[in-house]
Amino acid sequence: MQDDVRPDLWSAELEELLVRVGHRFGQVDLRRRMRDYVHGLLAPVGRKNSWQLAEQAGHRTPSGLQHLLSRACWDPDELRDDLQEYVAERLGDPTGVLIVDDTGFIKKGTASAGVQRQYSGTAGRTENCQIGVFAAYASHKGRALVDRELYLPKSWTSDTDRCAEARIPGKRAFATKGDLAKDMIRRALGSPLPVAWVTADSAYGQDQRLRRMLEEVGVGYVLAGPKSQHIHAMGRIDSAFSRAPDDAWERQSCGAGAKGPRVYDWAAARLPPIDDFDGPEPTHGRWVLARRSLAHPDEIAYYLAYAPTGITVTELVRVAGTRWAIEEAFQAAKNECGLDQYEVRRYPGWYRHITLAMLAQAFLAAMAAAAAQKEAAETVPARWSRSPWQKYGGSWQLATPQ
């Protein structure tokens, strides 16, 4: 990514970002440690823990960076708010999509806050791990992680001594992953991020309270649901689509993938009108969608949608496909910014490392967006001093270059 933008612009953008968030770190030495930590997260360091980041920064010991993550006085939630404002400025778009998903962090032992043997979608099996629930923002400009919450199983929230040892606040009660997702969505909707849509996998899409919350505030969604999802007046969603005629399926791409466009057969149906929260005339409607694999026609995914009237199926498909953007953000944050390479065990340290890694990943996303914009600008021939499209005698023609 550094190769796509001049080093001086890369450095200037990073400096601007670090100055922007510096007021969250009250003391000069703390600001320096924060800067060293973020620089290290962006550097080609083998494993981005406090020891190796300290060595990268030229520190004799990691104690300063460990203090930054543990006992220093700063609030990672305030830094998260700055991060969301930065992403809104660099990647914001009126059609932006907020994506919710969780990822696992495999750990040893039982001391790390929230750790237990639990299913990790990242590993694809049950592991001794922590689970973080995340929100990412995606637009045509790029994608970046913008919020995070550590999932605490009941085995933790019911054990006050264990929580105290991990420095988990006493007010932190048990919350499902869906509850954590709803909290992050509310924060995003109250932030500068321009959010038109929310999408997530079926673990979150089947939560009726989450869907209702979005409908009440008039935010569109395309949320995956299980095949057993019951639809009013239709029954099970898989049964309803099994009766769909052949011409109900249309081949469409839901976005670019690593191997080219992600092409599937899609079917969509509007549901009967619902009461609208904004006035007597409906402004939104509910939909159901199905996505069928070309290679394996028996593999069908299902979606519930809520969208403005007049929406096209192509737009619903686009939003559904945007869900993969959070996987790309996870990969970038883990591979390039050390999101999963921390060695902190206590609750405050997790939030501090994760938020700083998210800040580093957002910076890389902003630089990628700037590089793409620069490349697009350079594809426009410089010889045109005005728009080449001109109207002559009622028809459009290309004007002569100046």
Image (cartoon, helix red, strand yellow):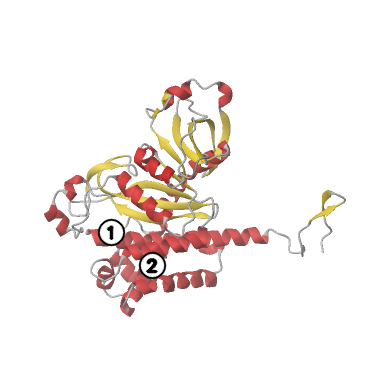
Residue lying at 51% horizontally and 68% vertically, measured from the top left: 10
Q: Nearer the viewer, residue 50 or 210?
A: 210
Between disc 1 and disc 2, the foreground one is 1
Who comes first in sequence, dot 1 or dot 2? Answer: 2
Which quadrant is home to the C terminus? bottom right
Q: Is residue 261 visible?
A: no
The image quadrant of residue 250 is top right
Q: Does 207 appear above or below 331?
A: above
Residue at the front extreme, as displayed: 280
Q: Does 323 appear above or below 93?
A: above
Q: Nearer the viewer, residue 159 or 5?
A: 159
Q: Amino acid at mark 1?
A: Trp
Q: Are marks 1 and 2 in contact (CB under 8 Å)?
A: no
Estimate the x, y position of residue 164 in percent, counting from the top left.
15, 58
Lateral position of residue 287 relative to residue 182, left or right: right
Distance of mark 1 from mark 2, alpha carbons? 15 Å
Which structural element holds mark 1? helix
Estimate the x, y position of residue 183 in percent, counting from the top left.
34, 51
Q: Is residue 31 visible?
A: yes
Estimate the x, y position of residue 73 in percent, counting from the top left.
27, 71
Q: Does 126 appear above or below 15?
A: above
Q: Crowdedness of circle 2 by 10 Å Cα count: few (<14), some, many (20+)?
A: many
**Residue labelled with disc 1:** 350
Estimate the x, y position of residue 144 in percent, counting from the top left.
45, 55
Q: Amino acid at mark 2?
A: Val
Residue lying at 51% horizontally and 51% vertically, measured from the top left: 96
